[in-house]
Image (tube, rainbow, N blue to C red):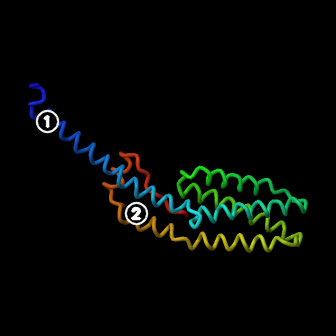
Amino acid sequence: MKFFKKRSVALVICLILVIASTLLNTRIKLGAQCRELNESLYTVEGIAGKLEALHVEADALAALAETNGLKADDLRQASADLQDLLSQRSVNAGQLYRCYDALRAQMCATAAQLSEKNVPGADTILARAQDLQDAIASSDYNTEVHSFRQRNGSLLTRFLASLSGVSIPEEFA
């Protein structure tokens, strides 16, 4: 018992308790805020709901292209990649955005091929896809992430978050 009565041992134990309680508090409170913000990305009304609908439009565009003798393998792959990321529900917004951007590029390429052939029906699909893209662009998610990062963006907070295993949400851009 004399070991625990030494000042140096007491100081080390106190430091360990203070650090552990700080990290635990960071993990619980900041982690809950980060999860809540991340979950807002995956709601039906959120970006993920609109991405799901865009995935459906991309598949419809691919089917239309294939019906008219065009290859749509890249578009189908980009759509499948987006669907895979959406099903994981734990992917950060940056990864999701990169997949979304790849899908948009493939949709534009396929749309260009369809417009060369004057394929009827393509305009309708592209208009619905554009409406979804506009809704994604006007989403409040990035504003919420930005204000969250301003409130919790100190060097100490970021350091404690990394030590406690909390990942700060990214913007969808």
Give how far across and how far down residue 77 sits, in percent. 74, 52
Q: Secondary structure at mark 1?
A: helix
Disc on the earlier residue, 2 or 1 = 1
- Amino acid type of disc 2? Arg
Question: Which residue shows up at 55% across the image and 71% down it?
Answer: 139
Neighbourhood count class around disc 1 (C-alpha, 10 Å): few under 14, some 14–19, many 20 upward: few
| Quadrant in which residue 54 is drawn | bottom right
Q: Which residue sits furthest front? A: 44
| Quadrant in which residue 6 is drawn | top left
Give how far across and how far down residue 5 sits, in percent. 9, 30
Disc 2 vs disc 1: Cβ atoms closer than 8 Å?
Answer: no
The CA distance from mark 2 to mark 1 is 37 Å
Q: Please determine whether, in this image, residue 126 is positioned above or below residue 102.
A: below
Q: Please determine whether, in this image, residue 23 is positioned above or below residue 6.
A: below
Q: Is 85 left, or right, of 71 in this rendering?
A: left
The residue identified by callout 2 is 149
| Mark toward the viewer: 2 or 1 | 1
Q: Quadrant of the N terminus?
A: top left
Give how far across and how far down residue 153 sits, in percent. 36, 61
Q: Quadrant of the C terminus?
A: bottom right
Question: Which residue shows up at 79% across the image and 63% down it?
Answer: 60
The residue identified by callout 1 is 10
